[in-house]
Image (cartoon, coloured by chain):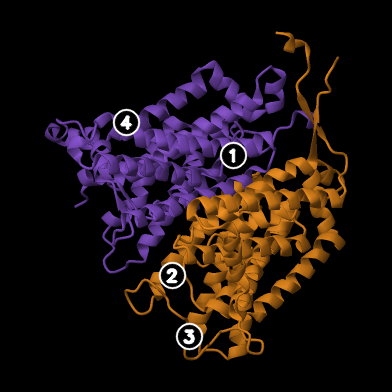
Chain colours: A orange, B purple
Amino acid sequence: MNEKKKGPIAHIVKRPDISLKEATAIRAGAIVLSILVCALVTFLLTGDDPLSVFRTIWEGSFASERRLWVLLQNVSILLIISLAMAPAFRMRFWNIGGEGQVMMGVLATASCMIMLGGKVPEPVLIVIEIVAAIAAGAIWAAIPAFFKSRWNTNETLFTLMMNYVATQLVAYFIIIWESPRGSGKIGIINQQTQAGWLPQIGEYKYLLTVVVAAALTVFLHIYMTKSKHGYELAVVGESERTARYIGIKVGRVFIRTMLLSGAICGIAGLLMVGSTDHTMTTTLAGGRGFTAVMVAWMAKFNPIGMIFTSFLLAFLGKGAGEVATQFGLNQSFSDILSSIIIFFLIGCEFFIQYRIVFRKEAK
Amino acid sequence: MFDIVSFIPRAVAQATPLLLGSTGETLTEKSGNLNLGIPGIMYVGAISGVIGAFFYEQKVGSVENANAFLAIAIPLACCLLGSFLMGLLYCFLTVTLRANQNVTGLAMTTFGVGFGNFFGGSLIKLTGSDVPSIALSITHKFYAAKLPFAEKAGVFGELVLNYGFLVYVAVIIALSASFFLNRTRKGLQLRAVGENPATADAAGINVGAYKYWATCIGSMIAGLGGLYYVMDYASGVWSNDAFGDRGWLAIALVIFTIWRPNVSILASLLFGALYILYLYIPTGTNMAIKEIYKMAPFVVTILVLIVISLRKKRENQPPAALGLPYFREER
């Protein structure tokens, strides 16, 4: 019973300021550790030697030029949605409605292509499409922000519910526009006329998406670090009271930022329907609205960092998909691997912010 | 003519997973943890039960050899263990390692759904069947066993007595959760942790322990929802992604009932009814309209969310510290 006299074995101390080098080392350590765990899990499930599994993961993305392009397209879409999440999270507005905002962009684009295809000149149609997709995403995102700013309605739950309303709206219009009748699918929209299809850069189908993603990354980096808006976001995120005190209209910042977030999500939807997939399904966003939350968070809402994190997740997704095909496992295997890595990255943040101090042995 | 006698049992069958999920999530949220991993946890609960049942069935071979107690206890224990571990993981990351709750929850949902579909897929392959599903007919029999006289008790029997035991368990759990939260000292302390952890801490309540217990027990209750879905509602048939978005509906239900498990008993029935209403409403050739009906639970939830924030009644608000981490050192 003499333990009573001693203090706790260890206590937690907040690190004053950690150097970038140290923080990166901790994160890299977490990634290495998580990959080891993934290897162990893969080994237990497939019985194959982990090295060949890693080779398969690599081949999933880099074995051919086509795969590389698909990877780049996946990274770009994920990056765009993550960029959309970042400014709202910076001010601690928990928007987990990216999925729904993307779906509204998808719906707006598809409806323009279907309703107006062949009726208005091509350039006009494309302009209408872009405006419609951006507006649809922005409005969808601004609704929860409006209620949050007016009545402090819980935004996490509100945006979450909006996802399913959007998905059901898409499901409704899929049945209205289904072709051929009774198939429950829309198929490729305007396959012959290609009306409303966004222009292709050269012969690369996916290049437009990559270019837009790059441009948006630069834009958001400047917006968040160099502009007055970006500064206001950071202040609201640090302390709403301080923000009010220095005269920032917090409600207006909420709505303005969510309009921007939604607009960018709308662009993601536009690119998916207009540039690469040319069709609309309820699973087109495919959970990327949620994955984007993790991508943005892991990069600490830094647009440049998000290039890396979205690449990591898209690469793993492709690679684990390849492992699944090769070893006859199913595609969900990639979800397991990427969430193991996310768990480690989430966990390692603790060791970046805090230090554990062990009790010195008292003599 | 609207066939209410066949409508209500089907609504109850839809409602039970939602009721269990929302009771578990309410308990969790009362401790201040917004566990968005509930959909994943329900998947894990379901697949763990399926794995247990699968191996038990492989061992006994036929209904005659099966022992009623083991056929129920083994899947139940597996389900509880699986969902408990998920709850533990969530707590370890958010309470001990102080990670962001939303991000952790979403990662858990990705993990849980992936886990369910992966092992579901593997089991399907193990059985080498042609259809992409596993049928657990032996254990299903025990889970769906009804009172012998229920059929004979007329309309009352059909509406009230004619369900598998997990339905009644769900109602009992919801009632006891309500009693626990409102009528016991521990429940009061739990609510204090969710409202204002710093004050609770100062009053000598172990905040971390309450968060851990509430979240882990809540996860186990939610996991039972998954188990009910596979073993009873789906007749012991697991097929990938069949569980759908019921987990998110359960979270919606928590808001809809303004954090009251006893209200959830009726509210889940309403949600269940909305979920299958389109089957009973003559839509003619207009198939699209049923997609609009499926939207109803979510729209209604948004309306409730708006109304409670408009009215600002204190007892109707979400727990004040919901979603916020608590660090003693940062007060």
Tags 2 and 1 both on a single chain: no
Left or right, B86 with respect to B100, comes to left
**Type of the residue with mark 3:** Asn
Q: Nearer the viewer, residue B120 or B203?
A: B120
Measured along the vertical axis of the image, is residue B15 above or below residue B1? above
Residue beneath disc 4: B168
Question: Compared to B105, does A131 lie above or below?
Answer: below
State the quadrant of the C terminus of chain B: top right
Residue B127 seen by the camera: yes
User: Type of residue at label 4?
Assistant: Tyr
Report which residue position mark 2 lands on: A173
Secondary structure of the residue carrying numbered label 1: helix
- At label 3, counting other C-alpha atoms closer than 10 Å, the crowd grade (few under 14, some 14-19, many 20 or more) is some
Residue A252 at least partly seen: no
- Of discs 1 and 4, which sits in the foreground? 1
Q: In the picture, residue A271 is in which quadrant?
A: bottom right
Q: Quadrant of residue B60?
A: top left
Taking the spot 45% from the left edge, 54% from the top edge, the residue there is B118
Looking at this view, name the residue that lies furthest to the top.
Answer: A1
For the residues beneath circles 2 and 3, the answer to whether they share a chain is yes
Left or right of residue B178, residue B279 in this image: left
Q: Position of residue B107 (x, y in %)?
A: 59, 49
Q: Which residue is mark 1?
A: B90
What secondary structure is found at the residue carrying circle 3?
Answer: loop
